[in-house]
Structures are given as structure tokens and as C-alpha cells.
Amino acid sequence: MSTHRSIAALFQLDRGAAASLQTQLRTKIVHAIHQGVLRPGLKLPSSRALSRDLGVARNTVSLAYQELIASGHLEARQRSGVYVASDSMPRPVIADGGVGEPARSRESSAVMRHASDLVIAQTRFRPPPQWREMPYPFVEGLYDRTLFPTTDWREASRLALAVDQVASWSTDRGETDDELLIEQLRQKILPRRGITAAADEVLVTVGEQQALYLVFRLLSTERSVVAFEDPSEPEIRALAQLGDAQCRYLAVDDEGVQLDQDLSDVDLFYVSPCRQRPTGVSLSARRRAGLRKAMAQHDFLLLEDDFESDLSFLGGAEPALKADDPDGRIVYTASLSKVLAPGLRLGFLVGPPDFIRAARRLRDLMTRKPSPITQRTAGIFLSLGHYDAMLRRLDKVYENRMIALRDALNHYRPLSIVIPPVTGGTSYWVKGPDGLDSARLMREAMADGVLIEPVASYFADPQAHPNIFRLGVTSIAEPAIREGIQTLGRVMTRLAEAGDRFPDQNAGFDQPASAALDGDAIRRKLAGQRLSYQTVYGEPCTIDLHQDGSMTGRAGYAQEDRDQGRWWVDDGQWCRQWANWAYGEVGVFYVECERNQLFWLDETGRRVDRAIIVGPIPASENLAP
Amino acid sequence: MSTHRSIAALFQLDRGAAASLQTQLRTKIVHAIHQGVLRPGLKLPSSRALSRDLGVARNTVSLAYQELIASGHLEARQRSGVYVASDSMPRPVIADGGVGEPARSRESSAVMRHASDLVIAQTRFRPPPQWREMPYPFVEGLYDRTLFPTTDWREASRLALAVDQVASWSTDRGETDDELLIEQLRQKILPRRGITAAADEVLVTVGEQQALYLVFRLLSTERSVVAFEDPSEPEIRALAQLGDAQCRYLAVDDEGVQLDQDLSDVDLFYVSPCRQRPTGVSLSARRRAGLRKAMAQHDFLLLEDDFESDLSFLGGAEPALKADDPDGRIVYTASLSKVLAPGLRLGFLVGPPDFIRAARRLRDLMTRKPSPITQRTAGIFLSLGHYDAMLRRLDKVYENRMIALRDALNHYRPLSIVIPPVTGGTSYWVKGPDGLDSARLMREAMADGVLIEPVASYFADPQAHPNIFRLGVTSIAEPAIREGIQTLGRVMTRLAEAGDRFPDQNAGFDQPASAALDGDAIRRKLAGQRLSYQTVYGEPCTIDLHQDGSMTGRAGYAQEDRDQGRWWVDDGQWCRQWANWAYGEVGVFYVECERNQLFWLDETGRRVDRAIIVGPIPASENLAP
């Protein structure tokens, strides 16, 4: 085998890869030089020979050589050829050093034996590494790469690296943030939340997490009492615990955080009013007023986490609490959209100028300022309107996914009900039957490709709500949602049948079945009747079963969601088909009655849904469509 | 004025700007929508009319409109025109809110009155905001945008945003660093320093500062004794002080940190052996051995800051201490080149796996992981060999600048000598005469456009060395260096003449001048003589003044730097011209002698340089060139 053949063998290129063949070739040559495989002074095959051996255009090899000659890795010798440059390797210190796995002791290292006793528990839920391969990842906050605005971000990135831009973002080694980004935050992002802030009241941080870290480091000590919502993010509680602050936990209900505890000794109150983090509940107007009153009365500070306030698809949000802060008691943190944030790591902090100065100083010691390149790119991205466009797109995508999730939950009713009436979040908190172990459910569901998130770690007492889990839509494509919920329902049924008999939670569901009605009884009992039904997400629904086999349905508090369909009896079973609801599919059920309660049973005899028989359809409304 | 004319007036474009006219127009329209100047439903001028009013191609306007229609800011109505979209503004919360400066109290805010007593002094030298306009910025570490590898970084950035790359760097919300970057650090960066590390022994951080923060937070408490080099970076000492550790200061000499103190109670030893931070001195082999011995004897940990080890232009560096760490006692921090780092904010930490796990956890709480986009871009930048190419370029640029600085210092001798023999840094520490107040010198020099850096803040005792200052070359272009030092010399002379009489430091310089020799005496005294001279940077130099008016010079410890020239006497003054030295210019001096000491005087009679008259040139060497 000739030398150039063996060299060519090093450079097998992948035509399927996105990187061009020329880029791949350059990368591989540089790598081989670093590995010492191509040694200084070695003559490389001619571009003609190498292109033939690799089966690529000669120009591909020529251009790669040319680039590497320009960068000093190769050198061209006249009338001789191309060689690995004699100084191609920047000063290697060890001649014998490859990259290997050093011998490793099982014991803790000397470093760790000397480490301070700073213990930081691993509390955050971590999805299994293979989650991307799972068909139904109902996990909030995992990254959906299909939503990243690649083209627009690339444009902003290209502009930020224009020569005059480099000149302007690289002005000093100081801690001043990028002027364009600050201006865009002040003019585009903060006003939407009702906040007016001067430039010296805003600090850019490495993600929102750093903003929170700075606040806890500056505003809490081991003598402080910090109030937290319960549930809350364990990674945020950990910040207070890092400083040995005492934590106080206040339960969250469907109006947000409850304020009925004595708050007189509270120093700092962490609250996420727009969308309670993690449940998504909005703080009610009544509670907002109560919180303001308590803040004034007990002289504490508020840390307002305006998490995900950029999502607006389920209705207009209230202004931030920070929008009305005459005494300067509120410190506000947020980040750019979660679609950008994981890639960018940009958050921000709003507070009084003297606090921002202190926070800037601490940020400087922690990390210096966040990447000026990224700051400028984000500033340009905002100034071109790409951010608005992205939010509009996201709103639509998330809204559709949430509707799909709601419909699927309502259709398949996997032995569970949904808790609080969320507005605008990207997940549902689902309360399973008492006795359900959501950690076990997660493990079982994973085997069927469904990933759900147990929420125990969000609660101050991780044992308090073992039967609650979370279904998020940020990482699952809309078409997969229905099948995912169907699958999850089957897993729950399997668990129940395997002996995990869940006690009754929706009275009657779990009763031994009474005798199913026969076909005639069904017709007698239901024709011309009005049923009252409650969706799994808590909304009322009225279904009129007309004598002529037609059927009308009205759902929602304003009965705004309407549908029509047909019902009939076939072989002792009740059948129905809506135009749109329940995916427009035919449903076939056995039926049982107990007093005015109607139960639908699946083929196995399990009660899967129920309604109240209200009585005959009022004559005035009995208008078959 | 018609509507479209007044709209056009909003969009004045700047033909000189780097952003395309189309980009500018889009930015301005989006801005005007956000400002409420262009309200939803407003009809925009036709592209024909607007292009005419703006004096740009119609296509420029059409394309801008098209983009903004696609992004939802504008909408096209058939047969009618282009309008501001009815939902062009994402949900504004306040109708009346512009962006203004809120009323501000002079008192400290409620937030700061409640803040913990965490005091973080502002200690770092901050250049005045106008430093970029100054012609001679001799300040280390300020950003030289001309060195940023714009084109190469742009290529890496473009590749990192390719669709398949986005897919791979966006894999999870976890704390795992970018695989490509880790691999490149392990294969290209660390081996140069002699370090072999497994993937779980490396952590990517938000700049080196975060790496240092993590180490101090994890390895020091208020019960710890931390040893620092003196001088050292105040921003690093502050990290130990944040944790209330006791600091011990060890002086630095020309072998690096001195180890003669009792180190028995030291817990953590911060050291920057490759290039002492900030003086640039390398730790001698003797001291390295001493430090290892003390570490074993007193059972302390080492924090090795491998600051600027990537610069190699003045000779090969020793391997890192971490390269030989069998017991796992050394934690290592570094960053990518300072030419990239300020823009990127990427550093890294190497340590035992259990320590890296703890550091990763704390990093996660502080900031989560550094931007995956930036990590991937850096990984690609390294894999394409751009990083090597950049270092080679930088080495050359910095080397040339340092030579220019050395030559200028030696030529103009601004009443000062250079301290330690640095190898490979990008600055000289300059010790002025006793009595010089370098803070005052900085202020005076600024008036003449010269920026120098006082170094008081680097010393544990800021009063200890008031006459030392630093001259750095990272931010000043080579051609400006000579004139800058000449100017600085003039400022120092002015200070001296204004009454700041500096006492003698190079004995004889400041003596009252004895009578200058006349022309004949000069010839008699010097023809055929050998002079021994010392450069300002401490190297010996021999000058032979031949009888025939030729002159040979040999400088350096190995006499490796040689030059030739002519000398003559003119109107009672000694004149000389080197081929290369002293810029090849003619120098004209009065001359005085005291015993075997020769003094050169400038026109004002000030002694500017001196030499020892060794004696006649040995016959064997008396070979005029």
C-alpha cells in the first residue's frame, strides 16, 4: 500500500454529514497532526492522488490544503509538494502523552477529602439519557430543537460578528452589559410586563439561575427567613439553603400561594405570580393585594420570578408585581424565552440601582459579564423583530399541543384528574388516584416509551403527594400526544390490574359493576335525556341525546365549545360518534346506571367515565340540529 | 406632508453602516411598531413610494416588507397594500407606559437597606472610559478587537448553527458539557501542558473566573488558610475573602513565589506557575520542587491557575504542575486564549472526578452550564485548527510588540528600570525611581495620551510599592509603542523637573553634572575602548568603539544580539549610529567621565545613560568589521 493510500485511509469522509467534505477533510488533517499521526515534515499526497483515493473532487482537496497552508498546519514547498509544517504543532510539552484514561482510585480524591462540607443534594428531576429516543416525552422544559429559530438566530449571529459590531461589543474588559441588549430589554421586553426601568436598574445574567443566585447571595444569610411557594423548584430552594437561610413553605392552591401563615418574621419572599413555578397557576388579584399588604406590614422584600411570562397563549397576564413598586422592595428576575435560553444562557435582573451595582459586582466575581458576543447577538435578534415572531410561533405551537393534551386526557381518562386550572403554562399537573405511586408509574410507563415527570422533589415534603405527576408539552410534537396518553392510560390500567387497586376517588368508578343495561333498557333510559358531564380538566359539559339519534354537546363555562353527533344502540352496547370531539371516532360502551348516575364501561367491564342524568331535554331546547 | 413622507422620515438609513439597508429598515420598522409610533392597522407606504422617499432600491423595501410580513409584524391586504398587523405587538400590559427614567431617590433603596452585609470592595483597576481614544494604551488585558479572529469564528459559528449541529448540542437540559469541546480540550489543549485527563475530570465554566469561584467556594471556608502570591489578582483574593478565609501572602521574586514562610497551617495554596499572575514570572524548577515538597509535608491542596499558558513566544514553558499529580491534590484552572475569552466567556477546570462532580453541581446552581451554542462553536473552532492558527498569529504579534516595547524602554530610558526577567508575558512591570507616585504618573501621562497601569491593588499592602507600574502590549498596536514610551519619558522628566526630584537609584544618574568632555578629550578617552553596558531589561551589552570610527555591539547573555555602527565627534558631542539598534538613528550626546564610569547627557545636560569603560579592546578581538 502506497503512503498516500494509507494517508487517505485516515481521511474517510462522511457524505451524509452536514459538514462539507472540505470541512471534514480539514478537521481530520488537523486532528491527525495533533495526534502525532501526521508528523512534521511528512509529505502529503498530491491533491490529485488524494482526491482520487477519497473519491472527491480535486478542488475539495486543493481548497482544504490551501486553508491549512494559510493557517500554518501545512506548508507548500516549491516544485516538491505539500508537507506537514515543521512547526505545525504548538509546543507539545510531553512527547509520550496520548490521551488516555488515567489510573483511577475508587476512594475519594485528596481534593475531596479536604473539601468543605458544602453539601448540595441532587434534587432536580433528570430525565434518563435515552429520553430523546422515547416516542412520548411528556417532560416539561426539555429542549425541543425543532423550535429553535435557527435561521433567524444565524442571521443575528452573522450580523453580530460583522467587523463594526465586533468593534463595538468588544469595547472593554469591564462589567458593562451590551448597550443594544439593555435597550431592547427596556423597550421591548419589560414594557410588556408593565415595567419601566432605567439602564442602571437592569443587569444581564448567565441565565435566570444566576440572577436568582445573586439575589439569594446578597439578600439572605443564615439569619434570614425565606418564604417559598410549595411546590417550588428545588434548584431555587437550594440557593437559600446554600446560604443556610431558614425556609418557610406556603402551600399553593388554585389562586396561587396561600398567605394564611404568620409572615411577621419573613425577610425575603420568593414568588412566581405570573405563572407559579412549577404548577403554572396565576396568582389571583386577591392574593396579589394580600401579598402587597403583607410586604408593607411585615417589611419584607419580594423576589419576583417572572418565569415564562413570555408565553401568552391562554390569555393576557397581569402586569408584573414589579410594575408597581414605589418603595423599591421588589427584585425581579426573568430570562429570554426557554426556547432560546438553554442555548444562550441569558437572563436578567431588575432592581434599584444600588442593588444592581452590588449584584453587578458579585456577578463580576462569579463569572464576569455574560458573553458579549451572545449579548450582542440577542440584542440584534430582538431589534430585528425575530423574538416577537418566535414568541408568536411558540404561542401557537404550545397552544395546539396543550389542546391536544387536554383532549387526549379527556378522551382516555387514564384514571386521573387534572389539578389546578392553569392559564398559559405548558404542562398539566395530573393527580392520579390515591395509592398511585407516580415514581413507579414513571418507571412502568418508560418501558412503553412514555416519559412523565414525578413531582415529589418540588414539594418541601417529598412524601406529601406521591400520586401527582406532571405532563409537559415543550418537548413532544403534537401528533404524538394522543397516542402517548392512550399508552399512558393502558399502563395505568395494567398497574391497577396487577394488583395496585387504587381506592375510589371519583366515587363509583371503582365499585363492582352492577348489571349492564341491555339494548332496550339503554334506549328507554337515555333517549331524549340531558346528561351533565365534567371534562377531565374540570369544565362542565352538557350532552343532549335526542330521540332521533342525533346528539348535541356544549362544553366550557360559557358553553363556547360545541359539537354534534349521533348515538345508537348495537348488540347491547351504547355507541356514539361526535363530529369533532373524541377525535370523531366511534365509541362503543356498556352502560350501567345507579340512581341518576350513568357509567360507561369498556369491553373489560371497567368503568371509564360517568355522567349525571339530569332529566328530559327541556322542550324549548329540544331542537335536533 | 403626506403620510408616507412622514413615515419615510422615521426610517433614515445610514449608508456608511455595516448593516445592509434592508436590515436597517427592518430594524427601524420593528422599533417603530414597538414604540407605538406605527400603530396596528396603519397602512404603510407602497414599496415604490417608500423606496423613492428613502432613495433606495425598490427591492430593498420589498424584501424588508416581505420579511416582516413573514414574521407577523406587517400584513398584506389584497388589492389594498401593506399594513401594520393588528396583533403586531405581543400583549402590552400598560397602555400608557413609555420607557422613561423613573423618579429616583438619593437614599439607598429598601432592597439595599435589607441586604446582607456582604461587602465586596471594588479593587480591580478600571481604565477610564475614553481609553480607546487614547493613542498609547499600555494596558494589559484590554481588548484588542483587531486580534479577534472574526472570519474563522464566523465560520465556526455558522457550522454550529447548522441544523444537525443544533440537534446535537441541544440534547438535554442537563449539565453535561459539549462533547466536542471536551474532546478538543482533552486532545489539543491539555496535552500541550502535559495533562492527561478523562472526560469526567474536565468541567467547562463561564470564563476562568467561574472556575476559580467554584474552587474557592468548595475548598475554602472561614476556617481555612489560603496562601496567595503577592502580588496577585485582587479579584481572585476577593473570592477567598467572600468565604471569609484567612489569607496568607508570599512575596514573588524573579523565581516566582517565595516559600520561606511556615506553611504548616496552609489549607489551599493558589499558585500561577507558568506565568505568575500578574507579574509574568515563571516559577523556577527549584521552587516547583519546593512547592511539591511542602504540599506533601503540610498536606495542603494546590490551586494551579494556568493563566496565559497558551502564549509561548518567549520560550517553551514547563509542563503544568497538574501534569504530575499522582495523589490528586491539584485542581487546575485555565481559559481559552484571552483573545477569545472576553467575547466567549469559556474557561475550564480539571480535577479528580469526585471534585468535578461537586463543582458541576455548584456550577449548575450558579449558572447552569455555559452556553451550549458557544461551547459547540468553540469545539468546532478548535477542531478546524483555527485555534492553533490564531495562537501562532498572536505569538507573533505579541512577540513583536514586546520587542518594540523593550527597545523603546531601552532607548528612551524613562528614569526607570524593568523588574523581573519575564518570559512569555505580554507586559513589563516597571519600577520607577523611589519617590515616584505611579498613580500620579498615570494621571499626568493620561493628559499626553499615555495609559499606564498602577499596580498597587495587586499587592496585599497597596502602599508597599508606589513606584511600580505596568506596561502591557495586548491593546496597543506595534507602531504606537515607540512614540508612547518617548511620550511617557517626557512626562517623567517633566514630573522630575516640576520638583518631584527622585533620589538616585542608578548611582550617578542624579549627581550634579561634572564638566562635559570636549571633543578631543572624548576621542582620547574612548577611541579603541570597550564599554560595558546594561540594557534596561537587565541584559549585558558590550560595545567596542574602534579607532577607525566603526563600532560593534554584542548584547544578551549569549551575546546573541549583534549590531554594527559608526561613532564620531562633532562640535564637542559624541555621536553614534547603529545599523539596527536605537532605531538606526543618529544619537548625539554630551559625555562626562568619573573614574571608569561614562555618562551620556542629553541637550539639557541630564544624564540619560551610562556605561563602564572596561579598557582597551583586546588585540585578538580588535577586528573592525
Image (spheres, coloured by chain):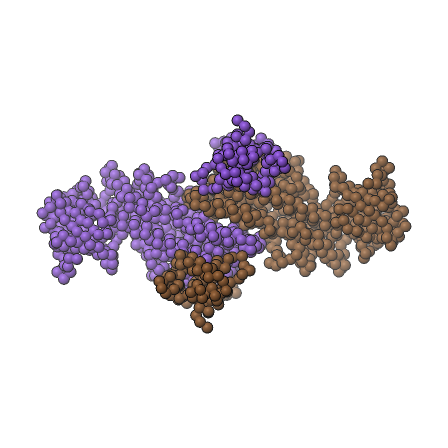
Chain colours: A purple, B brown
> Relative to the observer, which residue lies in front, A137 or B118?
A137
Q: Residue at x 14, y 52 (%)?
A: A549
Residue B15 at what x, y percent from top left? 54, 61
Horizontal side, residue A208 vs residue B336: left or right: left
Exactly how many numbered labels are in the figure? 0
> Relative to the observer, which residue lies in front, A106 or B514?
B514
Does any portion of residue A281 appear in the rendered image? no
Residue B563 at what x, y percent from top left? 77, 43
Residue B590 at what x, y percent from top left? 84, 53
Q: Which residue is drawn at 30% across and 54% down?
A: A421
Quarter of the figure that contains the C terminus of chain A:
bottom left
Image quadrant assignment for residue B490: bottom right
> Relative to the observer, which residue lies in front, B387 or A444?
B387
Q: In this view, does A413 lie above or below B316?
A: below
Does any portion of residue B85 appear in the rendered image? yes
Image quadrant assignment for residue A439: top left
Image quadrant assignment for residue A29: top right
The extreme bottom residue here reads B1
Q: Which residue is drawn at 41% across and 67% down?
A: B96
Residue B379 at what x, y percent from top left? 51, 42
Q: Residue at x 26, y 45 (%)?
A: A414
